[in-house]
């Protein structure tokens, strides 16, 4: 068995990867937008930040801009949730969902639910 240890990317490396990816997708971005995207990549995941590039470009094109700006990144960040925020949302609102597995001390919830009809 061969074990290869890896280290997380630094902020500088994430920025370089995002720059390369934006160039490959022909997306022009302001320096401020790149900084915000780098911050998102550090705090969330690089994959999530990379996916935001294309969507932010579409938002910028819709407003007839030549380059992606901070407002475009913020817009797509609010529309598309990363794994961390998605998990947090599910934990906060789990009681609101159908078939919630976490109970508030009611162990007889199954008795309250009518049996499924057989077809």
Image (tube, grey):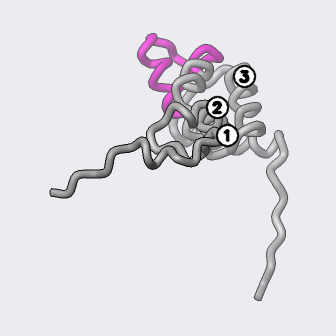
- The residue where tag 1 is placed is 84
Verify CB contact (< 8 Å) between mark 3 and mark 2: no
Answer yes or no: is residue 15 visible: no
Q: Nearer the viewer, residue 37 or 87?
A: 87
Verify CB contact (< 8 Å) between mark 1 and mark 2: no
Q: Position of residue 98 (x, y in %)?
A: 44, 39
- At label 1, counting other C-alpha atoms closer than 10 Å, the crowd grade (few under 14, some 14-19, many 20 or more) is few
Q: Residue at x 84, y 59 (%)?
A: 7
Q: Position of residue 111 (x, y in %)?
A: 44, 47
Q: CA distance from mark 3 to mark 1?
A: 26 Å
Q: Nearer the viewer, residue 21 or 39?
A: 39
- At label 3, counting other C-alpha atoms closer than 10 Å, the crowd grade (few under 14, some 14-19, many 20 or more) is few
Q: Nearer the viewer, residue 110 or 46?
A: 110
Q: Nearer the viewer, residue 19 or 71?
A: 71
State the SS at label 2: helix
- The residue where tag 3 is placed is 31
Range of residues picked out in magenta: 52-72
Q: CA distance from mark 3 to mark 2?
A: 35 Å
66 part of magenta stretch? yes
Q: Residue at x 52, y 47 (%)?
A: 108
Above or below: residue 47 compared with residue 92 = below
Above or below: residue 43 compared with residue 63 = below
Q: Residue at x 46, y 49 (%)?
A: 110
- The residue where tag 2 is placed is 92
Residue extending farthest to the left is: 119
Verify CB contact (< 8 Å) between mark 3 and mark 1: no
Pick whichever of labels 3 and 1 is earlier in the sequence: 3
Q: Main secondary structure of the magenta part?
A: helix
Above or below: residue 3 compared with residue 86 = below
Q: Position of residue 16 (x, y in %)?
A: 74, 42
Q: CA distance from mark 1 to mark 2?
A: 12 Å
Pick whichever of labels 3 and 2 is earlier in the sequence: 3
């Amino acid at each position: 068995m061969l074990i290869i240890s890896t280290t997380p990317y630094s902020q500088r490396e994430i920025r370089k990867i995002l720059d390369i990816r934006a160039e490959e997708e022909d997306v022009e971005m302001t320096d401020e937008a790149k900084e915000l995207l780098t911050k998102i990549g550090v705090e969330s995941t690089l994959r999530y930040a990379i996916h935001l590039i294309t969507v932010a470009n579409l938002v910028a094109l819709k407003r007839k801009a030549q380059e992606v700006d901070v407002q475009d990144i913020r817009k797509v960040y609010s529309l598309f949730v990363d794994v961390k925020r998605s998990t947090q949302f599910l934990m906060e609102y789990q009681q609101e969902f159908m078939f919630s597995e976490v109970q508030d001390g009611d162990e007889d919830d199954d008795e309250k639910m009518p049996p499924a009809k057989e077809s």
